[in-house]
Amino acid sequence: MTPGDLSAPADRFTLPQPGAPTPVRFPPITRSTLENGVRIWSMPHTAIPVVSVALVVDAGAAQDPATRHGLASLTAHLSEEGAGGQDAIQLAETLARLGTHLDVDAGPDVTTVSFTSLRRFFEPALRVLADVVTRPHFHEPDLVRVRELRLNRLRQLSRSPATPADRAYLASVFGAHPYGHGVLGTTKSVGAITLDEVRAFHRSAWRPNAATLIVAGEIEHDLVVQTARALLGGWTRPRGSNPENQNSTPEVVSAPAVPLPAGRAHEILLVERPGAPQSELRIGHTGPSRRTPAYHALVTLNNVLGGDFSSRINRNLREAKGLTYGARTAFDLRRAGGSFVVQTSVQTAGTAAAITEILRECEAIRQDGAIQADELERAKSSLTRGYVRNFEAADDLVRGATQLVAYDLDDTTFDRFVPFVEAVTGAAVVDAARTYIRPESFTIVVVGDPDQCRPQLDTLGRTVAVTRPEF
């Protein structure tokens, strides 16, 4: 049998050996700043004649007022309901003629408005984006319609076990911190939002000196700046940008740093769902920000523990115990901090057993010599071998640059990823686990049938409290 003989039988029981990772070379970013403070970033990508564009506004759900959760998201989506003299239908028709559409997304830290178009349609498409960002109509009938859609969406989500689990977890882990609520808000807060509040939030949060326009594609930087100046140069800062002006609109305040968990056992929070055939679990606590020096050790740790299909918790609960179709862990690293969370849905009868196994796995990975050389290499390979695929297209580059803006990262962030992960040692993974995974401080949320869950949970040695997340 000769090498390359296609008639040779495949060995289906031996994993193929991964090849060497491809190094990432993120393209150079050329920067300029308009007179009103809008930052312009552009990156070359000449594979096809398209441009991808995102305007990143430095305000997200973390800037929602305490009694108006969901305001940032509602403001973002209401902005595309009419702008620059065109209603929502006319805006959609204009964009359709250009072969594109706008995506508006409000996250915890930033809001983005983006599109991808052919190069020759860059200017008219950017004109629409500029209108949406700087000249939204904010009409009362649009607010009524969008708000009702949002309320219906919240009611729909309340019937899914995953969303109550997420909401109870966020509220317990982050407490009164701005990260402690969902982006969509609640029916009470969204129902109370007025048009004046939308307009005031837009004035204070959507500021030119808090915005970055990112462009990647077959287009010259000078043309990007020239077009941006023509379309965004008239965007003025709100009153309040000058701290000497006492009669001003206050600027958006950044979220405070998230504290790491204290060393105490938290109660188990039970969201009652009578008759549920499965229990939805969220287990974890607060964590570091995206800028943590331990980032590469953390993503490697996560892959070993629960971030990959072959990771420890998934193999334990799915294969060894047969309790779930899948379980995963994640470090949600945001600007001011984040969280570590284990997520899964398990058979109701195995609720306590699943929690016990998760706690055991999280404790085991903190012990000396916990990381075996082969599983460390598998975890690193799955992170590095396909990493370069994240930067193939122009819109991939824009998404990457959006992370640089959102988390204040430097330009070499993506170039460093592969070599830094390759250099992570087993000892570094264990050290990261000891620092950032503390089972004794975990919040445990269970959404399930109280008649079957409660007797199991009472055996785990923690106080059980019934909670009802707000929708």
Image: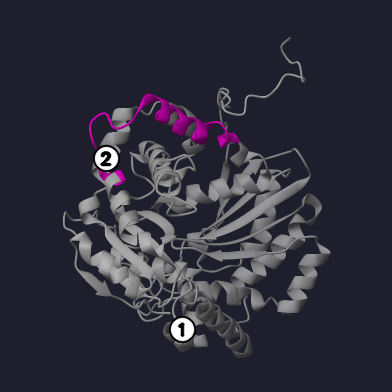
* Residue 232 in which image quadrant: bottom right
User: Which label was assigned to residue 364?
Assistant: 2
Camera-near label (1 vs 2) is 2
* Magenta stretch, residue numbers: 361-388
| Mark 1 and mark 2: Cα distance apart in space | 42 Å
Give the structural element (helix, strand or loop) at label 2.
helix
The question of residue 464 being in magenta is answered with no
For image coordinates 55% across by 71% down, the residue present is 76
Estimate how packed mark 2 is, as few (under 14), some (14 to 19) or many (20 or more) residues with alpha carbons within 10 Å.
some
Q: In the picture provided, is 1 more to the left or to the right than 459?
A: right
Q: Secondary structure at mark 1?
A: helix
The vertical placement of 157 against 317, above or below, is below
Residue identifier under label 1: 187
Residue 292 picture location, percent across and down: 34, 43
The quarter in which the N terminus is drawn is top right
Horizontal and vertical percent position of residue 203: 49, 75
Identify residue type, mark 2: Ala
Figure check: 326 above or below 469: above
Q: Position of residue 389 (x, y in %)?
A: 62, 38
Q: Which amino acid does the dot numbered 1 rest on?
A: Thr
**Of residues 273 and 250, which is closer to you in this image?**
273
Against 2, is 407 above or below?
A: below
Horizontal placement of 62 versus 269: left or right? right
Where in the figure is residue 208, as x and y percent of width and height? 52, 63
- Can residue 267 be seen by looking at this rendering? no
Magenta segment main secondary structure: helix
User: In this image, 176 relative to 141: left or right?
Assistant: left
Question: Please, which residue is most extreme toward the top here?
Answer: 2
